[in-house]
Amino acid sequence: MEAKNLSGHILVVEDQEPNRIVLVELLARMGINVSLAENGQEAIKFVESSSHVDLVLMDLSMPVLDGIAATKLIRELSGTKKNVPIVAMTANAFADDRDQCIAAGMNDFMTKPINASNLYQCIKKWVPTQISNQSHESTMAIGVSDDVAPELHDADMIAQLERDLSAGALPVMIEVFVNTLTDKLTDLEQATKKSDAKLIGESAHAIKSSAVTYGANRLAQQTAALEVSARAGNLTDLHEQFEAIKSTLHATVDVYSSLF
C-alpha cells in the first residue's frame, strides 16, 4: 500500500493488542492521527474529553464495557460529540450483530480481517478529507468454508500485510500475535475446566479475533465454532473442541514463528 495523504483524528477502540498494532500502523501510513482505547469505558471518556474526533472504530466484544453499550452511552452525550460517526469492527458476521449495531446507533459495520482496502474505503466514507489520486489496490477478505479444513496460515494474506505495512513492521507484529496466543489459550483452558459458557465464548472470541486479522484460518474456524456453541449454551463437545483448538494453536505458533 502506498502511503496516502489523508487527514483526520480517529479513535480506535480494541482490546486485543495484535489487532491494535495493525490498525495503528495502517492508519498512520495513511496520514491519520490515531488515539487508542482498550474498552468502551475508555472510549466514552475520550470522546467526552477530546476537542474533536472524526471517527470511532469500535470493537464489539471487549471487557469492562462492550462496543454496543459504549455506543449507546456516547449517543447520550451532550452537544455535537454524541454525533461522532461510529463504525463497528468485529470478527462475527452474524445478522443479529449487525442489527444490534444499528439499533445502538452505530453508523456502519466492518467485518474483520480489516485490511488497507476496506479501512481506506471506511475513512473515505466517514471522514471529510482531501483524498489523493494515488492508486489503491483492493484485496479480498479471507473466507473460511465449513466444508474444507483451512490452512494453518493464509500465505496471500501475510503477503498483503507485508505490502500494506511499513518495512520491518510485520515480524514485530507477528511476534506479538504469537505471544498473545499462548496467553489466550491459558484463559480458554481455565474457562473450559469451569465449563463456564460465557467465559468460554469470550476466550474463544479473543483468539478468533486475532487469528482472523493475521490469516490463521484454521484456528479462526475452530474458535468461531466454539464461540457459537458457547453462545447457544451447548457444551456437549467442549473438551474435544478445546483439544482440537489447543493442537491447532500450537501448530499455528510454530508456523508463524518460522515465517521471519
Image (spheres, grey):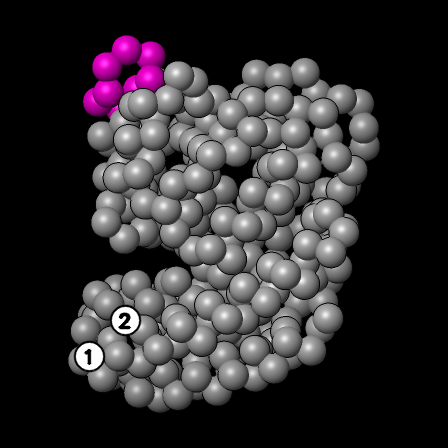
Q: Which residues are magenta?
A: 75-82
98 versus 155 height, above or below: above
Where does the image place residue 136, in percent across and percent down from the top left? Answer: 76, 35
Q: Dot 1 surroundings within 10 Å: few (below 14), some, or many (20 or more)? A: some
- Type of amino acid under label 1: Ser
Q: Is residue 76 left or right of residue 140?
A: left
Q: Dot 2 surroundings within 10 Å: few (below 14), some, or many (20 or more)? A: many
- Type of amino acid under label 2: Ile
Q: Is residue 28 visible?
A: yes
Identified at 34% across, 30% down, the residue is 46
Q: Nearer the viewer, residue 198 or 9?
A: 9
Of the 4 image quadrants, the one containing the N terminus is top right
Going from the N terminus, do you reach mark 1 or mark 2 first?
1
Q: Is residue 230 visible?
A: no
Q: Secondary structure at mark 2?
A: helix
Residue that numbered label 1 is attached to: 195
Identified at 67% across, 58% down, the residue is 170
202 versus 237 height, above or below: above
Cβ atoms under marks 1 and 2 closer than 8 Å:
yes
Where does the image place residue 139, in percent across and percent down from the top left? Answer: 70, 48
Identified at 32% across, 75% down, the residue is 188
Figure label count: 2
95 versus 44 height, above or below: below
The residues bearing labels 1 and 2 have C-alpha atoms spaced at a distance of: 8 Å
Which numbered dot is residue 72?
none
Of the 4 image quadrants, the one containing the C terminus is bottom right
Identified at 78% across, 38% down, the residue is 2
Where does the image place residue 227, in percent across and percent down from the top left? Answer: 34, 67
Task: Please check the rendered image and state whether residue 80 is part of the magenta-colored stretch, yes or no.
Answer: yes
Residue that numbered label 2 is attached to: 200
Task: Please check the rendered image and state whether residue 24 is part of the magenta-colored stretch, yes or no.
Answer: no
